[in-house]
């Protein structure tokens, strides 16, 4: 039973990574540096165009920065990302609307597999650690 659940989980992960890889490849091939999405909300803003999100990429197609805005165009989520030479996400920095660190998440890898996730608060204190243990046949 556990091996079936693990297999299903792995297949789902590979499916999502394949979808993401295709998008990443498209961003890279088309040399896209950033994407801005605008909303035209006719109920709340009389159709006025309001910024919904902003995403910035590196040359490899990795997301470097994501900003989400509320329905009035005010920043509600801002995240910076860092990657290692293999394209693994190693750090997420969550910022407040004023640009201060709200939290930092670090990822550690071993042999291409995620081994640890560490979450720090805005002051740099560890608030959560997750360790990933893989079972092999």
Image (cartoon, rainbow, N blue to C red):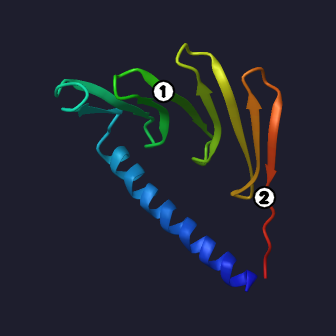
Q: Quadrant of residue 122?
A: top right
Label 2 secondary element? loop
Q: Which residue is mark 1?
A: 76
7 relative to 46, above or below:
below
Which disc, if any, is residue 132? 2
Which disc, if any, is residue 64? none
Give left or right: position of 52 versus 108: left
The residue at the point 78 percent across, 67 percent down is 134
Q: What is the C-alpha distance between the residues marked 1 and 2?
A: 31 Å
Task: Residue 89: give x, y in percent of width and height.
Answer: 61, 44
Number of numbered markers: 2
Task: Residue 133: give x, y in percent of width and height.
Answer: 81, 63
Task: Residue 20: give x, y in percent of width and height.
Answer: 45, 55
Question: Looking at the rendering, in which quadrant would you find the C terminus?
Answer: bottom right
Task: Residue 98: give x, y in percent of width and height.
Answer: 55, 13
Give left or right: position of 118 versus 33: right
The residue at the point 49 percent across, 68 percent down is 15
Give left or right: position of 19 versus 93: left
**128 or 32, which lies in front?**
128
Label 1 secondary element? strand
């Amino acid at each position: 039973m556990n091996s079936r659940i693990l297999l299903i989980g792995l297949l789902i992960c590979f499916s999502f990574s394949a979808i993401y890889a295709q998008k990443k490849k498209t961003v890279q091939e088309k040399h896209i540096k950033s994407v801005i999405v605008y909303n035209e909300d006719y109920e709340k803003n009389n159709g006025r165009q309001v910024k919904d999100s902003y995403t910035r990429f590196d040359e490899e197609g990795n997301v470097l920065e994501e900003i989400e805005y509320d329905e009035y165009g005010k920043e509600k989520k801002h995240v910076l990302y860092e990657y290692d030479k293999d394209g693994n996400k190693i750090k997420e920095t969550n910022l407040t609307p004023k640009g201060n660190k709200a939290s930092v998440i670090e990822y550690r890898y071993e042999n291409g597999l995620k081994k640890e996730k560490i979450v720090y608060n805005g002051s740099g204190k560890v608030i959560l650690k997750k360790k990933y243990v893989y079972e092999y046949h």
